Image (cartoon, grey):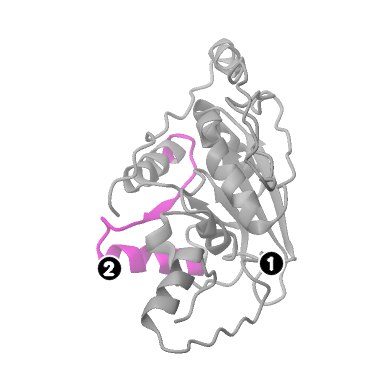
Amino acid sequence: LFSATMSKEIKKLTETYLTDPVQVSVTPENSTVDKIEQSLMHLSKQNKGLALQRIISANPKKRVIVFSRTKHGSDKLVKWLGTQNIGADAIHGNKSQGQRQRALDDFKKGKTYILIATDIAARGIDIPGIEIVINFDLPNVPESYVHRIGRTARAGADGKAIAFCAPDEHKQLWDIEKVIKMDIPVVEMEGLTQNLIPNFEKPAPRRRGGGANSKRGSGPRDNNSRNNSKSGKKPFRGGGNKSPRR
C-alpha cells in the first residue's frame, strides 16, 4: 500500500487485513513540504471568486491548480472565470478520459495556465512547474489537503498554497491544522477578507478526566456583500455545500 498520507482509518484496515505489516515512511507522518509557503484567507462564499481573480491576475503565466469540492462547482468556476477573461479547464469524474487528457496536455504545454480539479480527478497528477495551489473549497477529509498542496514545490522548487475559508468551513480548517500540526498563517486581501468571529471557538486539546467545553460565539460578521454591491462587482456564486459523487 502506497500513499502520500496514512490516516487512522487506513492504518486500522492494514492492521485488520494484513499479516505483520511493516510501515516504511520516507517523510514525517502527514507532514507538508517545507518549501511550500502556506497562507489562509477568511472569505465569504461570494468573495471567493473575486479573491481568486485577483490572485490569478497578479500572477500571470504561472501554473495554478484550483481545487473545488464538487464537479458542478468546478464547471461553474471555469464559466465564471471565462466571464472575467481568464481561461481555465476543469478535470473531474464527469469528464471523459479524452477531455481530461486534453486539459492536462494543454496545462503542461502552457496553453492553459489555470486548472480546476476535484480531489479524485487530481490523484496521481505529476506536473512540474506548478507554482500555486489554491484550495477554493476546503476538503472534508483533512489528509486531502496534504495531497492537494503537494502538487507544488516538487523537485526542490518553491511553491505557494493558498486556502480560502468560508464561515461554514471552520471545522474543516481546524481538522486540517490538527493533521499538519500548525496554524496556517492568515493573510488579508483589501476589501474582501473578513475579520470573522467563528460560530464556535476552536476546541481546546482534551485534558485527562474530561473534555474541553466549547463556547458559543455571536456568529460571523460580514460586511463585504454590502461593499460589493456598492462597487458594482459581480460576485461569484458558489456551487453549494453538498458533495455529490465524483
Residue depicted at 43% across the width and 34% down the height: 83
Q: Nearer the viewer, residue 156 or 241?
A: 241
Q: Position of residue 163 (x, y in %)?
A: 61, 45
> Compared with residue 135, is residue 103 higher up or lower down, i.e. above or below?
below
Residue name at image x 54 percent, y 34 percent? 48
Residue 143 versus residue 222: which sits nearer the camera?
Answer: 143
| Residue 53 drawn above or below residue 25 | above
Highlighted range, magenta? 82-109
> Dot 1: within a 10 Å radius of its alpha carbon, few (fewer than 14), some, or many (20 or more) residues?
some
| Residue under the point 69% across and 24% down | 195
Q: Give the quadrant of residue 213.
A: top right
In this figure, which residue is indicated by the disc labeled 2?
97
Report the front residue among 67 and 184.
184
Q: Look at discs 1 and 2 and give the one toward the viewer.
A: 1
Residue under label 1, please give it: 33
Q: Mark 1 is on which residue type? A: Val
Q: Amino acid at mark 2?
A: Gln
Question: Can you see residue 60?
Answer: no
Q: Residue farthest to the front?
A: 209
Q: Quadrant of the C terminus?
A: bottom left
